[in-house]
Image (cartoon, grey):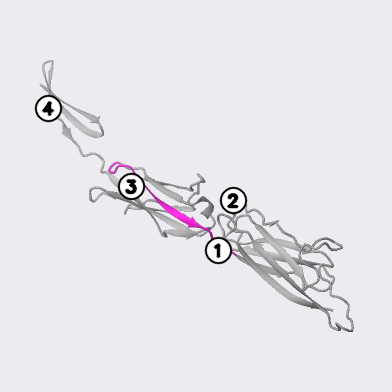
Amino acid sequence: MTNVRRSLRLAGMAVVVSAAVIGSTAVVAAPAFADAATATTLTVTANKTTMTSGKPVSFTAAVVPAKVGTTKITGVVDWTVVGHDGSIVPCTTITALSGGGKSRCQILKGSLLGAASVYTATATYSGDAAFATSTGSTTLEVTPGITRVKIDISAVPTSGAATTFTATVSDGPATPLVAGTVVFTVNSQYHAPGTPLNSGAIRCSGTALPVASNNTKTLVAQVATCSVPAGWMTVPNATKANPKPQDGWSVVATYNGNSSFFSSSASKRGTAKY
């Protein structure tokens, strides 16, 4: 009589078959089944429930085995972060799966925008020899960011001189803006907005902000300018009735906003004397 052992794998289970060969007849004993890979569940969480456009965020994946034991979880966690419009945002950094079953996806500022909200972050655990694969996801709402406009002037407006107004649009420290439009309205006491002058009109509108290539993270503000020609403001000559003439001026710069950033505006005014 000869003893024969064979190992088979059926439906994910290790099967050990023992057979005793007597003559030409094999007598098979009942199979012994080894334990299959332990099932796991994967939960994804974010470090904030909602956020404004351009802010950073961190997602954490926790892989938990169905049965607690002494074996440490190994393997890989793959991440995908997708906006509702299908745009894919890569993790800036990924923390590899730890022995405690956690992996982290960090996304820096300037990547998630309200225009593509809601975002879905999905993590997939690869599994290993002891633990089965699993997948989990979470969603994150991104709301439009609040913006600010600052107006600078090339020189204090004086009678008869050309002037350039500059509007700087930002939404806070180190957060980039997407493209948009700034509308300037420039006025003086003696020349209403849009009134033709010798060198043109004193209203410039629809001034486009430059496009940040792929939301370049070093671009923290965007600038638009409006140059008004000489003569946009002219203080009248002194007369006996008006010995000290002057002209009031004002400028309003309005950022129109978009699906990722709210609109905002700023203004300045002053007086030019003869």
Residue type indicated by callout 2: Asn
Question: Of marks 1 and 4, which one's residue comes earlier in the chain?
Answer: 4
**Toward the viewer: 103 or 245?**
245
* CA distance separating discs 1 and 2: 20 Å
Q: Point out residue 175 in the picture as x, y percentages from the top left corner.
A: 56, 61
Identify the secondary structure beneath mark 1. loop
Amino acid type of the residue tagged 3 in the rendering = Thr
The residues bearing labels 3 and 2 have C-alpha atoms spaced at a distance of: 35 Å
Part of the protein shown in magenta: 129-147
Residue 1 picture quarter: top left
Alpha carbons under labels 4 and 3: distance apart: 36 Å
Could you tell me if residue 113 is visible in this image? no
Q: Quadrant of the C terminus?
A: bottom right
Task: Say which label, 3 or 2, has the lower sequence index.
Answer: 3
Amino acid, disc 4: Ala
Q: Earlier in the sequence, mark 4 or mark 3?
A: 4
Measured Cα–Cα span from mark 3 to mark 1 = 43 Å
Which residue is at the far front? 241
Q: Which mark is residue 214?
A: 2
Of the residues under marks 3 and 1, which one precedes in the sequence? 3
Residue 85, magenta (yes or no) = no
Q: Residue at x 84, y 75 (%)?
A: 235
Residue indicated by mark 4: 29
Give the residue number, with chain letter if any, for mark 3: 74
Q: Which mark is residue 146?
A: 1
Q: Quadrant of residue 208?
A: bottom right
Looking at the image, tell me whether mark 4 or mark 2 is earlier in sequence order: 4
Cα gap from disc 4 to disc 2, whole angstroms: 66 Å
Q: How many marks?
A: 4
Q: Nearer the viewer, mark 1 or mark 4?
A: 1
